Amino acid sequence: MGLINFLFNGESRRNMRRLEKMATQVEALEPKYAAMTDAELRAQTDVLKGRLAKGETLDDILFDAFAVVREAAWRVLKLKHYHVQIIGGICLHQGRIAEMKTGEGKTLVATLPAYLNALTGKGVHIVTVNDYLARRDAEWMGKVHRFLGLTVGVVVPGMEDAAKKQAYNCDITYATNNELGFDYLRDNLKTDIRRMVQRELEFAIVDEVDSILIDEARTPLIISGKGDKSSELYERVDRFVRTLEGGFDDDGNMGEADTKDKKKKKPAEEEEEQPESKYGDYDDIARGAKYGDWDYVIDRKNRTVQITEKGAAKAEHFFNIDNLGDIDNAELNHHIQQALKAHKLFHRDEDYIVNDGEVIIVDEFTGRLMIGRRYSDGLHQAIEAKEGVKVRNENKTYATITFQNFFRLYKKLSGMTGTAKTGEGEFRTIYSLDVLEIPTNKPVIRKDMPDMVYATVDGKKRALLHEIETRHATGQPLLIGTATVEKSEEIARMLRKNGIKHNILNAKNHEREAEIVAQAGRLGAVTIATNMAGRGTDILLGGNAEYLAKKRMREEGVEHDMIELATSYAELEGEAEEQRK
């Protein structure tokens, strides 16, 4: 194993030396392009396209293309790619994964390979983890590409097909992994090729690549349509499931609904004398029967719940049937299992929220609402029955694909993240992608503090409140991360009670996301957020001056063109300085 690591590390060092030399060549072209006027710099796009038309390759024009983007970014954004960012850009162009630490400017890095590959006219997709980042990056980094004469599109949910087709026909398209996958499925269901919105899948740059290609790799995207009408069976099954008692998790501890049944547990001596279950010693159902004969057992580790023999007997009595395991009762058995999952494994304000009489899924990876999406196999209807809202029609699956299979359709694939090395084996095996660690521009001075563990929840809350009060008193901006919507609101109630002004960012108030993120870095700001403020979210110290300035002008009724003109960098810097004061 040590020899394998040595060989791989040796190859990485050789690759890094090659990329170092290439990045130096790009930097050497800076005086040439810095001397050009804006019009001359913009004209380089046509010059480079002409070189490709004459038979040169993308690798042949790489140095000039990267130097052009670097100069354009400086003129438009006042940002100039560092040496390590150029290395990252070359790495992405070569179809690799660039591991770049948090704060190293991965968003800016993507402009380099995106511009170079867009010169072919075949389109480049820059994939982000959520709609907010897709819109932000298309507007922010899109300024560089538009300055150079390329077209930039953004694809988000809710767009009409005509608008999506126009966005996909742009030179560079920003989109989320979800929307790209669903548009692919929708296109494959269309009967007229002229109605399809996507072009050939040419080149994708995946931001937070480990989250999308590994964490969510097996997540199925499902296109479904109206199926059979929902029957009152969901309500009947829900009433039955509410009568069931007990359950054990995978550690043999009593389930969440079982505290009142603790007295039923038999002494250990008697338990050892119990006859062996027909399900076997290690089966969850057997364990449920062995430790008190419960109606169901919960395996929390594998997120499964299973009805026991006792529960099946109750079902047979409740529904007046002879044998729940009979093939004729397969549908009823399925409904009971889904209702048990709805009650025991899916929790309100964690896995979903209820808004205006509708159950809306919360994405476990991004913390965002998945409006229009529904759980399959009757699970969504079971949750609707559990929450007492209208049970809507069941859906029938028409098309499905996993992220893993979808992204392997691209002719060239690359990605960037801060945490790729741990999944390098999977990247190599599944996607044929190697990982290159890009050094930081400056030594890391961030302090990663050790975890603090508390014996009780109340003790943790008191410590959290003390920490917030202490740091808030100094004016230090605070971001408090929570796992669920419910927990974020619980902390918010605690802060309100103690007179600490704050903002909450969760799936219930996602409309204010841009404003909350823009203000989260301001002096004295306290922000409570779920993982909506997770991967890729850029919180600027002092606040996002550009966003806040534009918002203020919109509120004052200033026209759009005048807003764009007024938010020059000099004014924005003044606005930021005013906020810091």
Image (tube, rainbow, N blue to C red):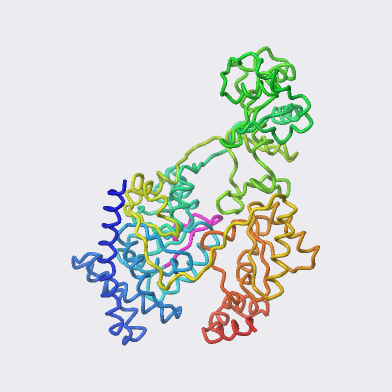
Which image quarter: residue 90? bottom left
> Going by the picture, which residue comes out furthest to the left?
55
Does the magenta run of residues contain 569? no
Quadrant placement of the C terminus: bottom right
Report the residue at 70% width, 24% height from top. Answer: 294
Determine if residue 229 is in view: no
Q: In front: 53, or 298?
A: 298
Q: In front: 155, or 530?
A: 530
Which image quarter: residue 105? bottom left
Report the residue at 74% width, 26% height from top. Answer: 240
Does the magenta run of residues contain 157? yes
Determine if residue 6 is in view: yes
Q: In front: 96, or 455?
A: 455
Is residue 378 shown above or below 141?
above
> Going by the picture, which residue comes out furthest to the front?
269
Left or right of 408 in this view: 249:
right
Which image quarter: residue 384? top right
Query: How many circles with numbers are drawn on the protein?
Result: 0
Left or right of 395 in this view: 78:
left
Left or right of 154 in this view: 435:
left
Report the residue at 60% width, 26% height from top. Answer: 284
Residue 548 x %, y %: 62, 76
Residue 100 x %, y %: 42, 63
Read off the magenta span: 152-167
Is residue 90 shown above or below 182?
below
Is residue 303 shown above or below 573?
above
Residue 41 x %, y %: 33, 81
Residue 538 x %, y %: 54, 67
